[in-house]
Image: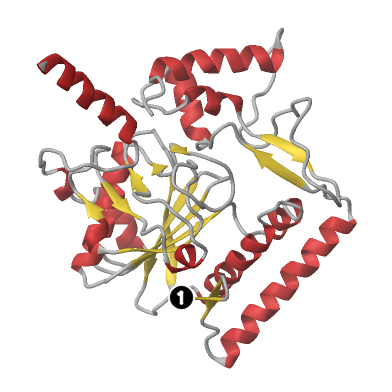
Amino acid sequence: MLKTITLGLALLLALSACQDGQYAASTRHLAPIPPATLALMSAKGVSPADPILMRAYKKESEIELWKRGADGKYALLKTYPMCRWSGQLGPKTREGDRQAPEGFYAVTPASMNPNSSLYLSFNLGYPNEYDRSLGHTGAHLMVHGSCSSRGCFAMTDEAISELYAVVREAFAGGQRAVQFQSYPFRMTPENMARHRQDPNIAFWRNLKEGSDRFEVTRAEPGVGVADGRYVFDAGDEATAGAVARKQADDERQVAALVASGTPAVRLVYEDGGQHRSFRETMVAAGGGLGQVSRPEALAAGPREVAVPAAGPVALAGKRDPVRGAAALKPTGPGGTEAERQRLLKIFAAAGADQE
């Protein structure tokens, strides 16, 4: 009977993924900010107590950490590679869809979990007001350690230890909530042009409004919700004008890219992705990341599917070549498929699917 209970608990833990249970207390949540990061803060004229803001990009698999300086403007402090995110580009809409959320979220002191089953974690606050207004469901969407995701951003234990410490010190300095901006990709004219026929493009254009305001002002955008979309504080007349000029310039660049023949595409993932540095690390070291969820999905890489100017996106049929930063390049006889099989073995050795 005891053996059965033990096996049942082990299975429950394996299936929990992003659902952070409370485990035996440790002191890992008290780890200091690493000296190199403290030195970086000092060089940029900011302190651990100064407010922070984070920006995540799925396609690029990165999280940016920004610090607010004495002038009230945020400056980029550091960029962290994501070890794993799951799902596709696009928002999370329902429980169990494996989607990492996109939108504007608030991490509060209550969001911090020092006893996470995934080393350390903090909750993004999904569903937020926007998600709830559309009836979106789900819970326990986290930034955490390890390299396994069921809708979360997995950063490795080492990276989450540092991020957790930075967030903790910002709260200790008086910050009440950390804005977490989550995007499908960097909101550049090229990305907007290439993804112009994606079913999520209207939502992404709405996200870009908030991104543009931050890019222009380097100040945290005020975020609200009205009529099923995000709305952003326009600021004073000068700020509103500067944001409008940036948006107009970006739209001109998008139009020029389309006119020059930039194709409309949709990226389709087997199940999310990871930063190329982790793939390179695993290839070089033959593993070492611990638990990796769905390694075969990572090895496959995303498909870049051409989208016609009108009509539905056709995903059936012959698989398109893998392209982009995660593309597997031919390495001799057998080419891409041989490399794909080699990577599959490496990822499988690093950790079988635990979800």
Q: 36 or 308: nearer the eye?
A: 308
Q: Residue at horizontal 56%, vertical 67%?
A: 211
Kindly identify the residue that appears in the image at 29 percent across and 37 percent down: 157
Image quarter where the N terminus lies is top left
Judging from the image, what secondary structure is the residue with disc 1 in? loop
Residue 219, percent from left and from top: 46, 75
> Residue tagged by mark 1?
219
Q: Residue at x 64, y 11 (%)?
A: 338
Q: 238 or 69, which lies in front?
A: 238
Q: Amino acid at mark 1?
A: Ala
x and y percentages locating residue 112 in the rendered image: 24, 55
Is residue 201 visible in this depiction of the protein? yes
310 sits to left or right of 92: right
247 left or right, relative to 216? right
**Which picture quadrant has residue 47?**
bottom left
Foreground residue among 286 and 42:
286
Q: Quadrant of the C terminus?
A: top left
